[in-house]
Amino acid sequence: RKEVEQDPGPFNVPEGATVAFNCTYSNSASQSFFWYRQDCRKEPKLLMSVYSSGNEDGRFTAQLNRASQYISLLIRDSKLSDSATYLCVVITRGSGNTGKLIFGQGTTLQVKP
Amino acid sequence: DTAVSQTPKYLVTQMGNDKSIKCEQNLGHDTMYWYKQDSKKFLKIMFSYNNKELIINETVPNRFSPKSPDKAHLNLHINSLELGDSAVYFCASSPLSDRPFYEQYFGPGTRLTVT
């Protein structure tokens, strides 16, 4: 089983739609969680951190469920510019203060006019 | 005012050759990383350096040797290139060595093709 699993998609949605992505992780000792965005042939960029209490940034809402080892990202009112691959990232503490980032395969979103 | 830069952006070479990829960050970060993104888009960490010291070394063939001449640079040298080394290699940096959970800033990537 992969350490971080995502449905690769693609998710094809019309502009204005609400879309949700899910991600599961296998290591219950994982400590930090993020969503990154990667545009085609570009580098990943941080979209938002994910907290147990849930957090919102404009049209984006992220949620963490530690009991089920599950992370979600909700995008409301999709824009064409939201088309990208969304990477779920989990950090597990290594020896000392090192942290190991584990990336999911990514979920591809295509927003159509 | 590029934050994390990598050279070259594209690298096409033959099997058996030795090549290097350079990375520089001007963000004043303590920690730098090398990642490999394969054709299936999985992004996997290879190495992490903190203040020129190696702190993470994943299961990477010893043909790959990172070198950090100073805190702002982390280069990747690859010996005896193989077809399976073809991928996009990303350099990244993050602030504060005792808080590895900070945002990672990625370079634009180096697309390596081994023929």
Image: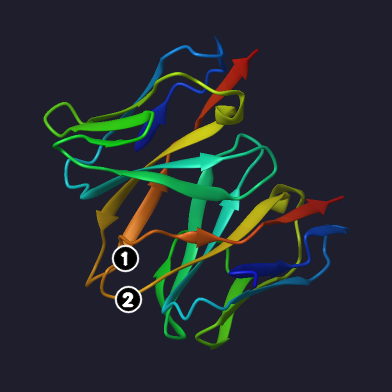
Q: Which residue is mark 2?
A: B97
Most foreground residue, B102 or A24: B102
Give the side of residue A77 with respect to residue B19, left or right. Answer: left
Residue that lies at the very extreme toward the bottom in this rendered image: B69
Give coordinates of residue B65: x percent, y percent: 60, 74
Vertical arrangement, residue A113 with respect to residue B110, above or below: above
Say the numbered circle drawn on residue B100: 1
> From the image, which quarter does the C terminus of chain A lie in?
top right
Query: Is there any visible trace of residue A105 in the rendered image?
Result: no
Cα gap from disc 1 to disc 2, whole angstroms: 6 Å
Q: Residues within 10 Å of mark 2 (few under 14, many from 20)?
A: some
For the residues beneath circles 1 and 2, the answer to whether they share a chain is yes
In percent of the image, x 26 and y 53: which residue is there?
A92
Question: Do the residues under discs 1 and 2 have CB atoms within 8 angstroms?
Answer: yes
Regarding mark 2 in the picture, which secondary structure is present there? loop
Dot 1 amino acid type: Pro
- Eyeballing the image, is B6 above or below A78? below
- Residue under the image location 61 percent in, 24 percent down: A80
Q: How packed is label 1: few (under 14 Cα within 10 Å), some, or many (20 or more)?
A: many
Vertical order, A11 against B27 (above or below): above
**Residue toward you, B101 or A2:** B101
Q: Where is residue B12 drawn, in percent x and y?
A: 86, 56
Relative side of B18 to B42, left or right: right
Q: Chain of mark 1?
A: B
Q: Position of residue B55 (x, y in %)?
A: 38, 74
Helix, strand or loop at label 1? It is loop
| Residue B17 picture quarter | bottom right
Residue located at (37% from left, 31% from top): A60
